[in-house]
Each structure stands twice: as structure tokens, then as C-alpha cells.
Image (cartoon, rainbow, N blue to C red):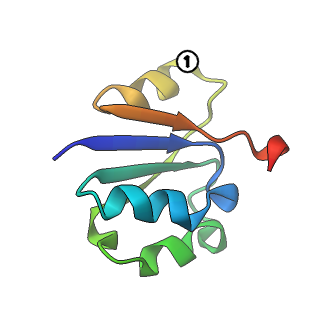
């Protein structure tokens, strides 16, 4: 199964983007700055195929965290929340 990593703050990730990849049989990794703030991503856990959705804490200013998040991804998407 292919893996897509979606970076950009889980509070801003459109569930349509996540659904698109889940419905195409991707494992989907999304990033969040604070994994304890489930209100930012809990709506995504209700999507069809959400068993293939993984939430990861990520600070993109830390190069090693970014490298670790993307290392196994076939596709990486960055969503800039300032442009939404």
C-alpha cells in the first residue's frame, strides 16, 4: 500500500483531501503540532477507511522530525494554512 504524508496543520486539513487518498487505498499520515488537541483531527477519524489514517506529531521547523515523517512516504503534500 502506498503512503501519503499530509503536512500543514491537521486543524486545516480538508477532509476531502484525506478522503481522496483513503478511498484510493493509500495509508494516510497527517501531521499535527500537538497530538493532544484531538479536536483538530477527530473529524477525520470518522471517514471511510480511517483505519488507514495515522496522526503524527510534527514540528516542521525541526529537520529531523520532518525527515522522519516523510521517509516512508510515496507522496508528500504540504497545505499552507495561511492560504486557505
Residue depicted at 28% across the width and 31% down the height: 72
In this view of the protein, can residue 53 be seen by the observer? no
At x 44%, y 75%, the residue is 45
Q: Is residue 16 depicted above or below 55 in this figure?
A: below
The answer to whether residue 39 of the structure is visible from this angle is yes
Left or right of 40, for residue 82: right
Taking 71 as reference, is 4 above or below it? Answer: below
Most extreme residue toward the left, as rendered? 1
> x, y (%) of residue 43?
55, 77
Question: For numbered disc 1, what is the local secondary structure?
Answer: helix
Instruction: Please state which of residues 18 and 42 is positioned toward the viewer in this rendering.
Output: 18
- Drawn side of residue 27 relative to residue 44, left or right: left
Frontmost residue, 10 versus 23: 23
Q: Quadrant of residue 14?
A: bottom right
Q: Pinpoint residue 80: horizontal percent, then vertical percent.
A: 72, 39
Query: Considering only vertical position in the picture, is 34 above or below 6?
Result: below
Q: Which residue is mark 1?
A: 63
Direction bottom: furthest residue: 46
Camera-side residue of 13 and 39: 13
Give the left or right position of residue 10, taking residue 16 as reference.
right
Mark 1: few, some, or many residues within 10 Å (few <14, many ≥20)?
few
Residue displayed at 60% across by 23% down: 62
Q: Is residue 74 above or below residue 11?
A: above
Q: Residue at x 70, y 57 (%)?
A: 12
Residue 19, horizontal then vertical, whole percent: 43, 65
Amino acid at each position: 500500500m502506498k503512503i501519503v504524508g499530509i503536512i500543514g496543520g491537521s486543524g486545516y486539513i480538508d477532509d476531502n483531501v484525506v478522503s481522496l487518498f483513503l478511498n484510493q487505498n493509500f495509508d494516510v499520515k497527517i501531521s499535527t503540532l500537538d497530538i493532544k488537541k484531538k479536536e483538530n483531527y477527530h473529524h477525520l477519524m470518522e471517514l471511510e477507511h480511517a483505519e488507514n489514517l495515522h496522526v503524527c506529531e510534527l514540528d516542521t521547523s525541526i529537520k529531523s522530525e520532518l525527515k522522519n515523517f516523510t521517509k516512508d512516504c510515496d507522496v508528500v503534500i504540504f497545505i499552507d494554512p495561511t492560504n486557505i
